[in-house]
Image (spheres, coloured by chain):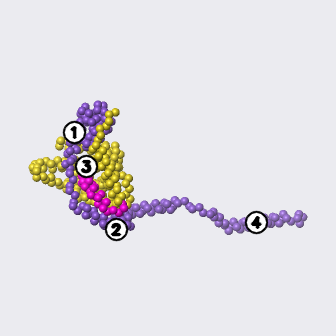
Amino acid sequence: MSPQPFDRDGVLKDMMAVATLERDAELMLRVREGDTESFALLLERHRMPVIHFLFRMVQNQPVAEELAQEVFLRVYRSRANYEPTAKFTTWLFRIATHLALNWIRDKRHERGQESLDVEVQEGVSRQIADRAISAEQTMVRESRFDEIRRAIAGLPEKQRAAVLMHKYDEMEYSQIATVLECSESAVKSLLFRAYETLRARLAHMA
Amino acid sequence: MLDAKTTCPLQTDNADVLLDYCSRSLDPARRGMLERHMAYCSECREMAAGQAEIWSAMDMFDAEPVSADFDRRLYSRIADIEKVPAWERVWAPIRAYLQGQPAWKPVISAAAASAVLAIVILVRPEAPTAPVAAPIEIQEVVEAEKALEDMDMLRQLDAEPEGN
């Protein structure tokens, strides 16, 4: 058997992941002991990923921030019972996903069976402004952004959550499986179907 | 493991290998194998190309900037929580749940709880108690006394010498 090539980047990435995992757990254990500075550090590290994930899920920035507040409040409230049995980020995204899915379902229930694609319209009004590019280019970019946003919004909720965690948060299949409370093979199937749908919907953009 | 000529990820439920390839998270050995396979397999080649395009298009979906007062609002809510006594923190979610229900829902819950309690009380096995003698009817006492008197009389008659 020929020796496997040494994947230096992969090893470094794994080492950093382990260090991050230990660091988060350590910080949370300190929060459990009443150290508020450690909570501030955790907030600093995870605020953006959580808010961005929630924004892409619900596609409404004020709602995303409100849900993110609830995520961190729940973390704070649960500090006394925290045990580092799972990755901190997995726990965090599990809370975030749960809140986002509930919000989407409540919203859909409130508005009848109206599609999310319509209901989030008001939430996302993006002005892509860049002085270096022309007005025409800006319009093209806005249009492409809108198409991607709509295509993602059109995915079933679990597929959407899986794709967002996979693409933007670079989470492993096992982590996504824990967050969505399903098997790894179910996650792979969700992702495959989601990307297939996106490829079909956005094929004209290629 | 992938064999360049015979094993196709799409034919063997290993499409995640193609997803990993496009997200650049495949290790070099498997990446090399897949690339050798794709040289023969147009289906995998097309899927990988399509996936790479989607992957790159999705980069456009940037998130919005976060409000400057996000942390301040959060800490203010945490401070509010800290002010609340412990018993109120336990009771608050229960109260919120009850308040969120239509007026008839707590009534149904209370009725269900009462029904369960009633069943528990009615079906509860009797506690073992000492056996109690059955009450003796007065009529039975009188008859018994008469029977005893009759027996005494017979005994006396038997005891008297013959010839008297």
- In the figure, B1 relative to B119: above or below? above
| Res A106 visible | no
Chain under numbered label 3: A
- Other-residue count near label 2 (Cα within 10 Å), few / some / many at <14 / 14–19 / ≥20: few
Query: What color was chain B assigned in the picture?
Result: purple
Image quadrant of residue B100?
A: bottom left
Query: What color was chain A assigned in the picture?
Result: yellow
- Other-residue count near label 3 (Cα within 10 Å), few / some / many at <14 / 14–19 / ≥20: some
The dot on residue B148 is 4
The dot on residue A168 is 3
Judged by depth in the image, the label closer to the viewer, 4 or 2, is 2
Tag 3: residue type?
A: Tyr
Q: Residue at x 31, y 35 (%)?
A: B2
The dot on residue B84 is 2
Tag 2: residue type?
A: Val
Q: Residue at x 30, y 66 (%)?
A: B79
Judged by depth in the image, the label closer to the viewer, 3 or 4, is 3
Chain under numbered label 2: B
Q: Are marks 4 and 2 on the same chain?
A: yes
Q: Residue at x 13, y 53 (%)?
A: A129
Secondary structure found at label 2: loop
Task: Report the quarter where the C terminus of chain A lies.
Answer: top left
Q: What residue sits right under mark 1 in the picture?
A: B49
Task: Report the quarter where the N terminus of chain A lies.
Answer: top left
User: Magenta residues, as a range?
Assistant: A32-57
The reply to whether the C-beta atoms of the residues labelled 3 and 4 are less than 8 Å apart is no
Residue A69 vs residue A198, the one in the foreground:
A69
Tag 1: residue type?
A: Ala
Secondary structure found at label 4: helix
